[in-house]
Image: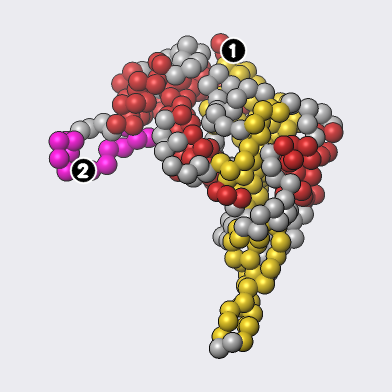
Amino acid sequence: MAHMVETMAYAGEVPWHGLGVPVSNDLTPEQMLDKAGLNWHVNELPNYINWEGEKKYTGMKSLVRSSDGKVLTSVGKNWHPVQNQTAFEFFNEFVAAGEMEMHTAGSLKDGQMVWALAKIKDGFELSGGDVIESYLLFSNPHEFGKCIDIRTTNVRVVCNNTLTFSLKEKSENVVRRSHRTQFDATEVKEALGVAKEKMNTYKETAQFLSQKRAKDEDVVDYFKRVFPVITTKGPDAKKDISKSAELALQALHEQPGANMSEGSWWQAYNAVTFLTNHMIGRNNDNRIHSAWYGANKRLNVRALETAVEFANVS
């Protein structure tokens, strides 16, 4: 099976998806760019067709990787690619000021998605020593239809779960920019200041869930809501609980850190994130894409919001 992760470098312990080349945690963004195999640039080449022996311009252009001539995508003339170098330079002032350190970087989907992840030095700790670390993720797509995506995200250290939150879309801690305009790093950093404030909402939510007790029967109903039964024919047609909900019930007490905030809605929510990060998906590198951009991200968001609903009435 083909891997979605093409190249990757990481600092510290082996990342939660078990992939990549280890590096030290004191690299500059430029050094991380090099170690992650991302020191290539995108060439913009016009597209032509051959019509009765005449070469005609289509009005489109191809984004071609300088390292190997790979065609990454075809886009319109108003598309402005952000070079990998520019994306990594975004972190320079944060790293130089000691506010962040480069953590992970790599290429997904054969170069169509390049990302850099920096650890923010403002994590927090819940009761029982449950440490949550904060990160800044810069996603730089070289693919038609995809926009630049810069967001803050959290990771539960004890089990390396990616914790995605929204608490309604307007509160999501993400800044997106289209490739139809020139990338303005200063403007994005100002917008991220607001997103960083929203991270405090997540901290408050995590603390709230860790302090609210969850009854066994309510937890079962919670997993049924998060992982509803899909109507099927055959022997499983009359089941009232899905396979994923059953796995979540099992993970509730078996996941790493299950003893932290035991019996709380935080424990129940993290049973879901354990499944999405370590069990649901074809393979490890598929899960990294899904946890950040795809179905598992949306599932984690729904799980958190549903946990808050249950906790509010418990």
Total numbered circles: 2
**Residue 3, how many percent across, how many down?**
50, 42
Q: Nearer the viewer, residue 239 or 39?
A: 39
Residue located at (70% from left, 34% from top): 118
Q: Which stretch appears magenta?
A: 224-238
Pick whichever of labels 2 and 1 is earlier in the sequence: 1
Pointer 1 residue: 129
Q: Is residue 228 magenta?
A: yes
How far apart in space, not on screen, are marks 2 and 1 (Cα)? Answer: 43 Å
Task: Provide residue 268's location: percent of width, then percent of height.
Answer: 43, 23
- The x and y percentages for residue 123 are 67, 24
The residue at the point 79 percent across, 40 percent down is 30
What number is the disc on residue 21?
none
Graded by Cα atoms within 10 Å as few (under 14), some (14 to 19) or many (20 or more), the crowding at tag 2 reads few
189 within the magenta span: no
Dot 1 alpha-carbon crowd within 10 angstroms: few under 14, some 14 to 19, many 20 or more:
few
**Residue highlighted by disc 2:** 232
On the image, the x and y values in percent for residue 40 come to 72, 50
Residue 186 visible in the snapshot: yes
- Who is closer to the viewer here, 39 or 211? 39
Give SS at disc 1: helix
